[in-house]
Amino acid sequence: MSLFLSAVGLMMVFEGIPYFCFPEQVKSFARKIPEIPVGTMRVIGFCLIMAGLLVVFLGGGRA
């Protein structure tokens, strides 16, 4: 459970960085999201999931 909470906390830190450092660009990008086709968003989401799983697999400790 400790590892899970650490992962969630780290995710929140990384998610918050753009909002803190570049709030105007985040707002501009958020306005453009509805224009992105659903298929493109699915491909981007799938690629991010696969990249995340690869990072977890490669970074996972083997005790």
Image (cartoon, rainbow, N blue to C red):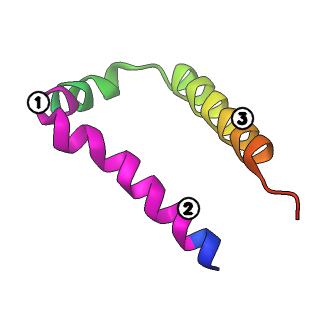
Numbered tag placed on residue 7 in the rendering:
2
Q: Nearer the viewer, residue 4 or 45?
A: 4
Q: Secondary structure at mark 3?
A: helix
Q: CA distance from mark 1 to mark 2?
A: 27 Å
Q: Position of residue 25 (x, y in %)?
A: 18, 26
- 62 horizontally vs 37: left or right: right
Main SS of residues in magenta: helix
Q: Residue at coordinates 18% horizontally, 37% vertically from top-left?
A: 21
Q: Quadrant of the C terminus?
A: bottom right
Q: Is residue 21 above or below residue 4?
A: above
According to the picture, the residue beneath numbered tag 3 turns out to be 50
Highlighted magenta segment, given as a residue range: 5-26
Under circle 2, the secondary element is: helix
Q: Residue at the location (63% across, 70% down)? A: 3
Q: Amino acid at mark 3?
A: Met
Distance CA(mark 3)–CA(mark 2): 17 Å
Q: Amino acid at mark 1?
A: Glu
Residue 42 drawn above or below residue 2: above
Toward the bottom, the furthest residue is 1
- Give the spatial CA distance, label 3 vs label 1: 29 Å
Callout 3: few (<14), some (14-19), or many (20+) C-alpha neighbours within 10 Å?
Answer: few
| Quarter of the view holding residue 18 | top left
Q: Is residue 4 left or right of residue 24?
A: right
Residue, disc 1: 24
